[in-house]
Image (cartoon, helix red, strand yellow):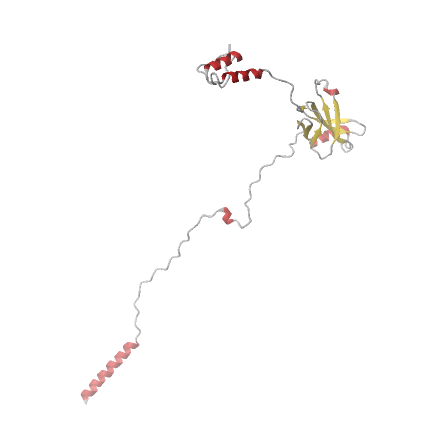
Amino acid sequence: MLFFLSVLGTLILSALIFLWLNKKPHLAEKKPALPEPVAPVPEFKEEFSSELSPPGFAPATPAEPELPRYYGVDRLVLLARDPYWLYAYWEITATKQEEFAAVHGPTAWAGSQPVLRVYDVTGRSPGEQKVASYIDIGINEEADNWHINVGEPDHTFYVDLGRLFPDGRFVTLLRSNTVTTPRASLSERTDEEWMWIEGIYRSYRYQFGLGSPMFAEEMAQRAGALPLGIGSPGQWQKE
């Protein structure tokens, strides 16, 4: 009986020890920490201005410099446009207007009319130009250029820009250069000196060739000097 009780006590004690060990939490084995994943580096792509600009947007181009409209200089320039027309452009500074008002009065500018006086001085010497025939062309105050119909080919003109008073007085402000309109037909003048070179060229280019010394010698004898552009072993000098 005593043996049986001792064996039973041993079994109960073993069972209690077993139950107590099962209730104790097991310590988890520590594992080495893994490194945090690194974000991939984005691949940069080359971009152009057209891709960065919004749709319909055009990049601004630098503006080209413009010529000034006025230069602060009193001047009147006359050009021959064709056999029948002239073209004039001018600039009148405030200083010129003040000088006009100082001489003729503060109301003289408003009381006069701007006029282009066109002189035909064809065949006249400088001393005779003062009595040349002329025509007056009324212009507006805002004008700074004018096309002038003279209707005279091969004629010489100059123009005065001034103010015309009601009593007929004309005061010149600016005077232009002198121009000659071109001819409206073929010129009657001929230059015979151009004919001999053409004859020599046609006569000798097939016989001797352009590079021939005989052709060069003939040209030199006629012209008195070696023409340019012809090959020669020596250098010709004019006596």
Q: How many marks?
A: 0
Residue 38 vs residue 45, the one in the foreground: 45
Q: Position of residue 233 (x, y in %)?
A: 44, 15
Please tell me whether residue 215 is drawn above or below residue 71 in the rendered image.
Answer: above
Q: Is residue 211 left or right of residue 4?
A: right
Residue 46 vs residue 20, the one in the foreground: 46
Q: Position of residue 3 (x, y in %)?
A: 18, 87
Question: Going by the picture, which residue comes out furthest to the top?
Answer: 239
For residue 130, say whether it is visible.
yes
Q: Position of residue 70 (x, y in %)?
A: 65, 33
**Residue 7 appears in which quarter of the rendering?**
bottom left
For residue 102, say whether it is visible.
no
Q: Is residue 87 left or right of residue 33?
A: right
Which quarter of the rendered picture does the N terminus lie within? bottom left
Task: Say which residue appears at 74% left-offset and 20% top-offset.
Answer: 130
**Residue 24 appears in which quarter of the rendering?**
bottom left
Task: Say which residue appears at 77% left-offset and 26% top-offset.
Answer: 170
